[in-house]
Amino acid sequence: MSFDPFGDFETAGYLQNALQLKDPVEVKESEHLSFELSMEDALVYLAKKKPIDYACVLKVHEILFSDFYPWAGKARTELVPHLAVFKGSQDDEWPAMIGGIKGLDGLDKEGITYESLDNPEIQQIYNSYRTRVFGATRPAK
């Protein structure tokens, strides 16, 4: 897995997962297990929320994945507010789709640039904002 927005794959594993896993198969299996174990809680939460908005989506992400990813449920805009970080190429239609989703259209506001986390300069910016927001804490080894 080459996607390493935190720049600490070697010490913290893929996306700073709680088990510090690096093998893609193990990561996917653990993500899936976290999802399955938390699905009922997420459904109970969603049943109480009408309408479902962006804050609900973040909360569901936290419910489903926080046992595996300590940052689950956090908006990427908290980490790098001036960047719209995404996986994929710049040819993707992601920016155009955002405007059509109720509650997400504000993410595509003027002044945001779309950059790839494969760019070392963007990784450095991402890491500096992450440190400012969350401090220098890392998952336990």
Image (cartoon, grey):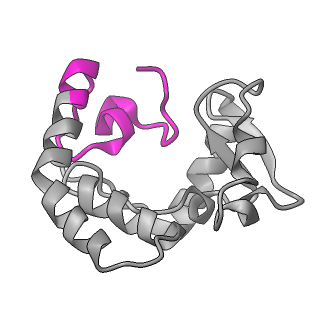
Image coords of residue 98 (percent x, y): 70, 50
- Name the residue located 30 percent from the left edge and 57 percent from the top edge: 70
Residue 135 appears anywhere in the view: no
- Name the residue located 45 percent from the left edge and 67 percent from the top edge: 134
Relative placement, left or right, of 19 versus 108 is left
Is 12 contained in the magenta span?
A: yes
**For residue 88, which quarter of the picture?**
top right
Image coords of residue 65 (percent x, y): 27, 52
- Name the residue located 76 percent from the left edge and 54 percent from the top edge: 99
**For residue 41, which quarter of the picture?**
bottom left
Is 126 contained in the magenta span?
A: no
Assign the N terminus to one quadrant of the image.
top left
Please state which of residues 90 and 71 is positioned toward the viewer in this rendering.
Answer: 90
5 is higher (above) or lower (below) than 135: above
- Give the residues drawn in magenta, as a range: 1-28
Image coords of residue 135 (percent x, y): 45, 67
**For residue 40, which quarter of the picture?**
bottom left
Relative placement, left or right, of 9 versus 117 is left
